[in-house]
Image: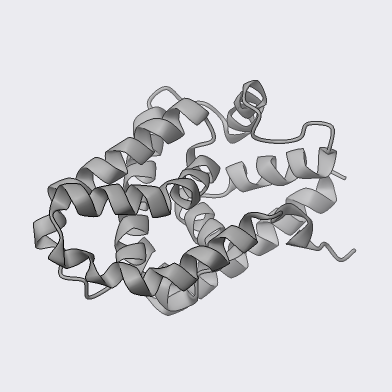
């Protein structure tokens, strides 16, 4: 049975593409104050970072906490940012590290990935009348954290493997391998749970 992931992307892709078109103008932000720069970054990246983090940590409240911490860390390190990797990569790396830090912290209060997906029901994150979408989110939550990050960056945010490697702090080949394994695991989960 062939499984097609395109069903789950939604209109977010259009928003990401518009963000990419504006990313070139952001490189000039190093010439502004940290306060002004962060205001601009929050305006431009708040929504895409929110959804990236949300797919990682599931809960709306946790997502808000991680998003806030992401921008706080960006603000604190504003003067040391050299711009070599680009602002988008830099912000996504901070968001990834903060998401993984929260997930690691939560492991001490062990919640299974399926419980995590069930917890999302309290939020309006998923259309629960669409069983395929629910199963897709459950499948995403069963992935190891790094694979989930790589899959989310590639699938939803349409990052290329060079960007993913930079954000996830791994080689390009590792990013490709992680994406391939994640895709295979999600397909297997979906086929098993149809």
- Tell me if residue 120 comes above or below residue 73 in the rendering: above
Q: Is residue 72 rendered to the left or right of residue 106?
A: left
Q: Is residue 11 rendered to the left or right of residue 177?
A: right
Task: Give whichever of 17, 33 is nearer the camera.
Answer: 33
Using the rendered view, name the quadrant where residue 120 is placed.
top right
Residue drawn at x 32%, y 53% is 41
Task: Look at the image and tell me in which quarter the C terminus lies.
Answer: top right
Residue 73 percent location from the top left of the image: 21, 45
- Tell me if residue 88 comes above or below residue 11 in the rendering: below
The image's colour scheme reads one colour
Using the rendered view, name the quadrant where residue 171 is placed.
bottom left
Residue drawn at x 56%, y 30% is 112
Task: Look at the image and tell me in which quarter the N terminus lies.
Answer: bottom right
Q: Is residue 111 rendered to the left or right of residue 14?
A: left
Residue 10 percent location from the top left of the image: 71, 54
Task: Give whichever of 15, 121 is nearer the camera.
Answer: 15
Task: Give whichever of 183, 152 is nearer the camera.
Answer: 152
Residue 169 percent location from the top left of the image: 32, 65
Q: Is residue 42 rendered to the left or right of residue 54?
A: left
Q: Is residue 107 visible?
A: no
Task: Give whichever of 72, 141 is nearer the camera.
Answer: 72
Residue drawn at x 50%, y 69% is 159
């Amino acid at each position: 049975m062939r499984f097609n992931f395109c069903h789950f992307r939604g209109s977010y892709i259009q928003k990401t593409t518009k963000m990419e078109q504006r990313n070139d103008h952001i490189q000039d932000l190093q010439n502004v104050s940290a306060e002004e720069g962060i205001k601009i970054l929050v305006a431009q990246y708040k929504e895409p970072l929110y959804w990236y983090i949300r797919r990682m940590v599931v809960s709306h409240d946790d997502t808000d906490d991680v998003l806030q911490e992401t921008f706080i860390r960006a603000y604190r390190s504003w003067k040391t940012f050299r711009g070599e990797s680009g602002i988008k990569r830099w912000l996504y790396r901070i968001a990834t590290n903060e998401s993984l830090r929260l997930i690691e912290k939560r492991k001490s209060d062990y919640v299974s990935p399926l419980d995590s997906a069930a917890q999302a029901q309290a939020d309006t994150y998923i259309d629960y009348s669409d069983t395929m979408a629910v199963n897709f989110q459950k499948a995403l939550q069963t992935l190891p954290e790094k694979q989930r990050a790589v899959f989310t960056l590639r699938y939803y945010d349409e990052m290329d493997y060079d960007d993913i490697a930079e954000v996830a702090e791994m080689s390009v080949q590792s990013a490709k391998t992680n994406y391939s394994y994640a895709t295979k695991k999600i397909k297997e989960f979906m086929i098993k749970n149809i």
